[in-house]
Image: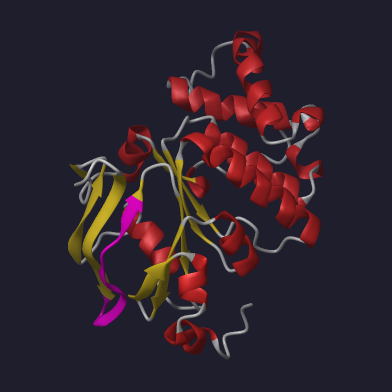
Amino acid sequence: MAADHIVETQDLSIDFNGFYAVKGVSLKIARGSIHALIGPNGAGKTTCFNLITRFLKPTAGKILFNGRDITRTKPADIAGMGMVRSFQISATFPHLTVLENVRIALQRKLGTSFHFWRSESSLHSLDDRAMQLLEEVGLSEYAGLTAVELSYGRKRALEIATTLALDPEMMLLDEPTSGMGHEDIGRIAALIKRVAANRTVLMVEHNLSVVSDLSDRITVLARGEILTEGNYAEVSSNPQVIDAYMGTGHA
């Protein structure tokens, strides 16, 4: 694999009793880029995520991460290698504080998540790094609030902070702005751009204005197969892409 590609899939496929949710998908994700997967409902976007992070076992094909074959690697081991999908650690603990949520994620990185017998004071050594992460995602002033008190958009920012706590080389974000109002969408899009400054991001996103603003490259899926790839201007003017989106209800 060329050194400038952090992830490559080769003819990746999965079928469920003869139905191909993903078929022959070959992706090359450039290191340090923001790469978007888009397509109408049922196109196979989330299934691709699940295959790349090994939450699903492919029927055929190969997955390479930093040139290493991870097709049969366990999801937790893939996360340990530096490829983290946000939902793997992003389920926040609603009745712990924002700071405590990030601190738990930092414990995972250190391998001390299950040291329940240690006193709470022993965890305070992680507070400075946790606050740095909260500052990075714009949540430092909410550190003392419980997660349940946050707005939806700020909860998503907290999820990104807990993902960043694992210091990933690559982040996979599944519809990071889904269900948000305009103000929150702008805040999360700006956050994604900031955290992508020194890492690779692969995201599924329905909001095409976010895709156009953030993405270096876009892969369009339809019925489990790649329809086309390119920058936003190229894919948005492609007649096949326009046809695929017509009637799906997505902007």
Residue 25 part of the magenta-drawn span: yes
Residue found 42% across the figure and 42% down from its top: 32
Query: In this rendering, does residue 53 appear at all?
Result: no
Residue 49 locus on image (x, y percent)? 40, 58
- On screen, residue 30 versus residue 217, left or right, reads left
**Depth check, front residue: 62 or 104:** 62
- On screen, residue 146 versus residue 218, left or right, reads right
Residue found 81% across the figure and 42% down from its top: 149
Q: Which residues are magenta?
A: 16-29
Residue 148 vertical placement versus 120 (above, below): below
Q: How many marks?
A: 0
Residue 42 part of the magenta-drawn span: no
Quadrant where the image shows the C terminus: bottom right
Residue 225 vertical placement versus 64 (above, below): below
Residue 104 is drawn in which quadrant? top right
Residue 150 locus on image (x, y percent)? 79, 44
**Depth check, front residue: 234 or 86:** 234
Please say which color scheme the image uses.
secondary structure
Residue 42 locus on image (x, y percent)? 45, 78
Residue 79 locus on image (x, y percent)? 38, 38
Q: Main secondary structure of the magenta part?
A: strand
- On screen, residue 29 versus residue 218, left or right, reads left
**Depth check, front residue: 1 or 89:** 1
Query: In this rendering, does residue 164 appear at all?
Result: yes
Residue found 24% across the figure and 69% down from its top: 13
